[in-house]
Image (cartoon, rainbow, N blue to C red):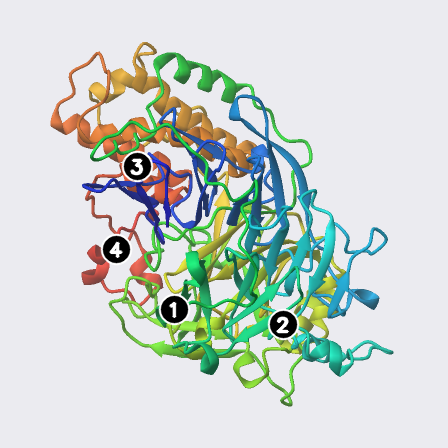
Amino acid sequence: MAIDKLGRLWVGHLNSGVSVYNGKDWKNYDVVDGPIGERIFDIKICPKDGDVWMATSAGISRYKINKDEWEHFTRENGLPEDQASVLAFKNDGTLIVGTQCYGLAIFNRIANGNYKFYQKIDAPERFGPGNCSPVPLEPREPLDRRHPLNGRLLSNLINDIIVTKNTDKETIYVATNAGFVKMNDQFKGLSFWRGRDYADKVRGLYGGAPKGWQQAPKEIMDQLLPEDYLTCLAEDEQGVIWLGTRQNGTMLADAISGKKSYGTIKAMGYPDNFVTKILCLSGGEYLVGFYGGGVVKSIKPFRLVDRKLEKTRFNIAPTFSVTKKDFPKLPSPIKPLTAEELRAMYYKLKKIHHQSKPPKVLALNDDWRTQGDWIDRYGRHSAVQCAMAGGGDFFGGYFLHEMESCAWIGKNYRQKNDQIRRWIHWFTSNDKRVLQCLWSGGRMQAEWDDHKEAYPMSLDGPHIYSMYKVPQGKYILSFYFFNKDGHDGANRLRDCVISVKTMKLSNELFEKLGNKGIDAEREFINARSNITTRVNNFWGGVYKRFLIDVEKNEYITVQINANYSFNTIVSGVFFDPVGKLKSLNYDTQSHQLRQPSKWVTILNDVSADSWWRVNILDQSLCLRDNNSAWFYTKGRKYILPITRSLVEIKEGVPRSPVVIDKKDKEIIRSDVGSLLRELQLFEIADKVDFTSTKYELYGWEGRTALRRDKVHTYKWNWEKFY
């Protein structure tokens, strides 16, 4: 949540964008009329101009408060990934973006209030001899210019960032899952601090601690944080830094005097130990938010140091010129494009050429909206429903015969001959977050499990590994995660990292990996550079997605890393081909025009705005097929303004020279919804697909246990894949 300079409250949602309250009315802004992604991770207000910035599941969105306009930032603008987890500002307006898996991205404020990418700050991929460790082997360091971590991070998994305001210099603190890094205002390293569990993590490495490694002496261990995993940061009015942890409450540290205090459950009267947010108020008052424990307000003021409060040039509240009204106007949604803008966009897309050497693997936007309703969206080539066939895996898809797969856990475990677990928790469920089950015809909650619950969280493993062989081509590979017990006990501590690589292997090695569990860790680490993404706080259910270009005799190898958390789980794996569906530009019969109508007239009338909108979507489909890397990293920003216009089809085709009757409107809605579903931007398609068409199974009931009377429970639409 955040409050802008007009006093309006902004509230981010799990999968429905952002809502704004002006003191009288609420208004929601979703992906087609507001933020670029449906999941909002953070909201911050720029101190220079009061603009509202949102970190989302598909990039960063900026609401320009003085111009009443929206702007989006994605990988096209320099972000290392679109999943931004946290935002922070320096006093001069410099934007610091913390990403989920790729460290920090710094954007400088330039002329006219615009922003330009400046630099990326990240951590090494691995640490220690032979790249043995995912985190550093040292507990703390003051960083001089010769230290290898000067200007680097401890981890690329960023949980929070603050820029101090109550001291004479701006200092930047970055909280990660491996402690915190302290930087000066030029982003040069000053020091880093780890938790006392760092030593157990070193001993828990695959093969044990490196030869010659020694734990820090007791006097240093006593000075470390309660744990490595820091959830949040805050600064109080005396310049004292508050740090929230995942399992040990809070810690307070004074950067000036060096004094510190641990806020344990007993000492502070906390209802829980999983701290998610800290808000420091005036006079030593504070609020602490907990995962599952509500919010605690201080009973009495708390001061770590006795120091006179001083004003600095950073903590003076900015003044804005605000028109005095009882209730400020609510923000305007994203405006539909004009006819001139539509034409310019169409010809710009026509000029985009194929990328010469696109990456083999790309991490795509998350999908937090589909949840368990995967049918007719995912698995169009093949699907693995983890453990759903009576404890074994259930496989589906028209092209299932073209896929080979296997799954296992890594070798870093403590029990003899341990193996991957396949659990069924709920045989039936009405919870929409639970995956639809092809085997039973309803919903079933089942999952793979790496059995990490039997081992300490400091163990680097076992992790879930899986491998897939599919025909040569481009695919969207999606994993569905649902933390059904995510509000309870250790289950809420899950925070995994998914890494995907393509590897050339012999069939014999594939069999050994799948059946005998040979040294998969070393094979995986030594493979080509991989793409990672992170999954945490997934009680709401999320699809983590990748674009993969598979060559002949290549296997897709996936590691779902426990990341020093509780046991690793996953419920479903889905493959969808890219480039299988033809667009209007290839074959005019492929488009779903069901009957002659005035809609056909509009499609053939270049003077109609609707012609430009639909053909831009169709051109996007061509780019998806021919230039997939460009489309999935940059195309979303072009499609969103188009869908904003198409939402108005609810009332009729906007600015159309032809009068459209009710029947034609239904055809248009269905056709546009079909185009958007083919673009596989489901959270956008939901906003314009107003049809209630029921589809038949077209033979699927013969391949599954799904009965004919269950057909209308779902929207099946497999006929286009014959």
Which residue is depicted at the point 65% across and 55% down? Answer: 501
Identify which residue is drawn at 55% across, 70% down: 251
Judged from the image, the secondary structure of the residue bearing numbered disc 2 is loop
Mark 3 nearby-residue class (10 Å; few <14, some 14–19, many ≥20):
many
Label 1 or label 4, whichever lies nearer to me, is: 1
Q: Quadrant of the C terminus?
A: top left
Q: Residue furthest top?
A: 607
Between the residue at mark 4 and the residue at mark 2, the CA separation in whole angstroms equals: 50 Å
Q: Position of residue 253 (x, y in %)?
A: 60, 66
**Residue at 68%, 31% in the rendered image:** 356
Q: Nearer the viewer, mark 4 or mark 2?
A: 2
Residue 67 visible in the shown view: yes
Q: Quadrant of residue 351?
A: top right
**Disc number at residue 673?**
3
Mark 1 to mark 4 CA distance (whole Å): 50 Å
The answer to which of 313 and 674 lies nearer the viewer is 313
Q: Would you name the residue on which mark 1 appears?
A: 298
- Real-space Cα separation, disc 4 to disc 3, in angstroms: 16 Å
Instruction: Determine the secondary structure under disc 4.
Output: loop
